[in-house]
Image: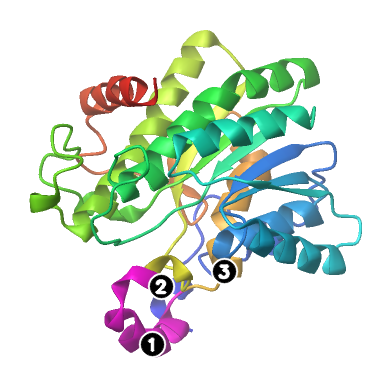
C-alpha cells in the first residue's frame, strides 16, 4: 500500500486506510435521522449506506432522484431493514433548497444529523440559476441556506431527545489553494478573472468558515449542537469530471494511489456517529483527527464577513 495509507493513526485510533464501516463498528444509530446531500454517488452514497447499516433513518438529498432511487435499492438489498427517503435537491438552486426543506418538513421527522456533502470541482465558469458562480453556489452557498433553514429543527430535536445534534460539512484541504484574497467578495461572479482551481479552493475555504462561525454562534446560544468540517482525502469519484482529458490520463493512476469511497466516507461517518466526537465543535478534521488550519482559514474576521455576505445573498 502507498505511503499516504501507511501513516500511523492519530489520537482517534484510526488510520487513513480505515473504512466507514470500520470506524462505526458497534455504534447503534437507531432512532437517529440524518440528511445527506449528494447521496446518489461517490462518498455520499457510501455515507448513506453505512449510516443505514448502523440503523440511522437516512434522507438522501439528490439532484437526480432516479439515480438516488437506484442507490436506495442497492442499499436495501444489502441492509433489508434500512430506512431511506429520497428527495430532490439541487444545492446550486436556492428555490430547490427551499422546496427540499418543505418536503422534508412534510415527512414530520426529527433531525439529528445534517451532512453537507454534495459538490462539484474545477468546473468551467458558469452562473447558477440565481446568478452566482456555480462552484461557490453548489459547494457553499446552497449548503449555507440549507443549514440555516434546518437549524431550528436540529436544535429542537437535540433539546427534546437529549441527543447531541451534529452538522458535518465536507470541505477540503484545497482551501489552501484559493485566490490571494481568500474570498473574493466583489469578484465572486467575475468571469474575466475566474480560475477553476482557486474557485474550488475558495468554496472549500467558505465551507470551513461556515462550520467555524456557526459553531461559535451555537456555543453562545448554549445549545447541544456541534459543527465540524473535514477533508475526506483524495478520492477517485466523478467530482473530477470537469478535468476532461486530464482526468482520463490520471484515471488509471488514480485507482492505484487515491482512496476508495469506503475510505473517503470514513471521516464523514466518524463525525456523524462516533462518541469520540461528542462535544467537539468548530474543528477541521483530517483522517479522524482535528488538524491545525493554515491561513487564510485562521482569519476569523474574514469568516464573519463571509457570514454577513452570505446572509445577504440568501435573503
Q: Return the mark for residue 4.
A: 2
> Closest to the observer: 156 or 220?
156
Q: Return the mark for residue 261.
A: 3
Are there few (<14), some (14-19), or many (20+) residues within 10 Å of tag 3?
many
> Closest to the observer: 262 or 241?
241
Query: With respect to residue 128, does 44 lie above or below?
Result: below
Q: Mark 2 or mark 1: which is in front?
A: 1
Query: With respect to residue 287, does 181 lie above or below?
Result: above
Main secondary structure along the magenta-highlighted residues: helix
> To which residue does mark 1 refer?
253
Classify mark 1: helix, strand or loop: helix
Tell me the residue at 73%/52% (across/down): 51
Q: Which residues are magenta?
A: 241-258
> Closest to the observer: 185 or 154?
185
Tell whether label 2 touches label 3 (CB within 8 Å). Answer: no
Of the two numbered discs 3 and 2 on the same chain, state the one appearing first in sequence.
2
Q: Is residue 202 left or right of residue 64?
A: left
Amino acid at each position: 500500500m502507498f505511503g499516504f495509507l501507511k501513516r500511523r493513526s492519530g489520537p482517534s485510533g484510526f488510520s487513513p486506510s480505515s473504512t466507514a464501516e470500520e470506524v462505526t463498528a458497534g455504534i447503534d444509530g437507531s432512532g437517529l435521522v440524518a440528511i445527506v446531500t449528494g447521496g446518489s454517488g461517490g462518498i455520499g452514497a457510501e455515507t448513506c449506506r453505512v449510516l443505514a447499516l448502523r440503523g440511522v433513518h437516512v434522507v438522501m438529498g439528490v439532484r437526480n432522484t432516479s439515480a438516488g432511487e437506484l442507490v436506495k435499492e442497492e442499499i436495501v438489498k444489502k441492509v433489508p431493514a434500512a430506512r431511506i427517503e429520497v428527495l430532490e435537491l439541487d444545492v446550486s438552486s436556492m428555490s430547490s433548497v427551499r422546496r427540499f426543506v418543505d418536503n422534508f418538513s412534510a415527512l414530520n421527522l426529527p433531525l439529528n444529523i445534517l451532512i453537507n456533502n454534495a459538490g462539484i470541482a474545477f468546473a468551467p465558469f458558469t452562473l447558477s440559476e440565481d446568478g452566482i458562480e456555480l462552484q461557490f453556489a453548489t459547494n457553499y452557498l446552497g449548503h449555507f441556506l440549507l443549514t440555516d433553514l434546518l437549524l431550528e429543527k436540529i436544535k429542537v430535536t437535540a433539546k427534546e431527545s437529549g441527543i447531541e445534534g451534529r452538522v458535518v460539512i465536507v470541505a477540503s484541504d484545497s482551501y489552501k489553494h484559493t485566490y490571494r484574497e481568500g474570498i473574493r467578495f466583489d469578484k465572486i461572479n467575475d468571469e474575466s478573472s475566474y480560475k477553476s482551481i482557486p474557485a474550488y479552493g475558495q468554496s472549500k475555504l467558505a465551507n470551513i468558515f461556515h462550520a467555524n462561525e456557526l459553531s461559535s454562534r451555537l456555543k453562545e446560544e448554549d445549545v447541544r449542537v456541534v459543527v465540524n468540517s473535514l477533508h475526506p482525502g483524495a478520492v477517485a469519484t466523478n467530482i473530477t469530471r470537469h478535468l476532461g482529458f486530464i482526468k482520463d490520463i490520471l484515471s488509471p493512476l488514480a485507482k492505484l494511489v487515491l482512496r476508495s469511497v469506503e475510505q473517503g466516507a470514513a471521516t464523514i461517518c466518524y463525525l456523524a456517529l462516533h462518541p469520540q466526537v461528542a462535544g467537539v465543535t468548530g474543528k477541521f478534521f483530517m483522517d479522524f483527527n482535528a488538524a491545525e488550519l493554515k491561513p487564510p482559514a485562521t482569519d476569523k474576521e474574514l469568516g464573519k464577513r463571509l457570514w454577513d455576505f452570505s446572509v445577504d445573498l440568501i435573503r
